[in-house]
Amino acid sequence: MYGLLGTSLKSRFVFLAIPDHGEPPELKDLKRLLNCSEVNLYKADGYYKDSFSEVEWLLHFQKRGISHEDSWCIGERFFSHVVKLGPRCEWNSMAELRYSQQIVIRLELDEQRLRSLGRLLQGIRKLRSQLAHGVKAQGAVVRAIDDLKKVDLLRNVNLIPSQADIDAIFELFGEFERQQYDLEIESWIALARFELSLPITQVPMHSSLGLA
């Protein structure tokens, strides 16, 4: 997403998930709601789709967990549109209310956060490769033992590991590492997420309790 930052040191993005049958956002409506002309609207699967792939994967791992089974490509999309706010543009309560059901996440990104996201995803990719290798190795051990059981004239068959022995070897394989990356994902999101500039509702200091 470096290219989308442009000349700004940092930019704010709002990721929206509009269902297939839903009404997509209009740029003119966003500008009106935000009372700001410095707004850009992108389709997640459009020209800049590669720019959003790292955020897509971040949400994928947050919601689906880290597994060796997923191929390193985006199979499902967690957002359909991305709103980029200009430096003098704030995501206000009106826009929040208008798109409250479609907002997936709001992120404030700069080069440092994008670099840290890249490192995080690279580490997860390495872990997934290690998990896949472990699963493959476990299958190879099982097949080798099955072949060993078919060998004639063995005298110490009681020394052949059982399925329970193999399961014990691979018990909790990679679980600690997955949990650590789950924490890193949540930590990255917590640091990058931005809140509203204004509350959605403002309650007067003196309510209807009869206080003057």
Image (cartoon, grey):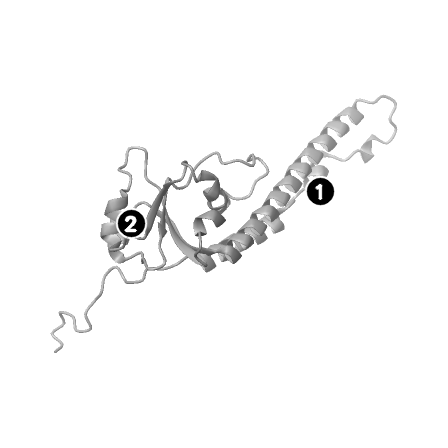
Query: Which element type, helix, strand or loop, lies under badge 1?
Result: helix
Seen as rendered, the residue at the extreme bottom is 212
Who comes first in sequence, dot 1 or dot 2? 2
| Residue at (64, 40) in percent of width and height | 129
Residue at the disc numbered 2:
100
Residue 42 visible in the current orientation: yes
Question: In this rendering, would 11 be left or right of 122?
Answer: left
The x and y percentages for residue 40 are: 34, 47
Is residue 159 placed above or below 120 in the rendered structure? Answer: above
Pick the front one: 18 or 32: 32
Question: In this rendering, would 141 be left or right of 47?
Answer: right
Query: Which element type, helix, strand or loop, lies under badge 2?
Result: loop
Q: CA distance from mark 1 to mark 2?
A: 47 Å
The x and y percentages for residue 196 are: 32, 60
Is residue 97 placed above or below 204 in the rendered structure? Answer: above
Quarter residue 156 falls in: top right
Is residue 132 placed above or below 89 in the rendered structure? Answer: above
Residue 169 disc label: 1
Residue 97 visible in the current orientation: no
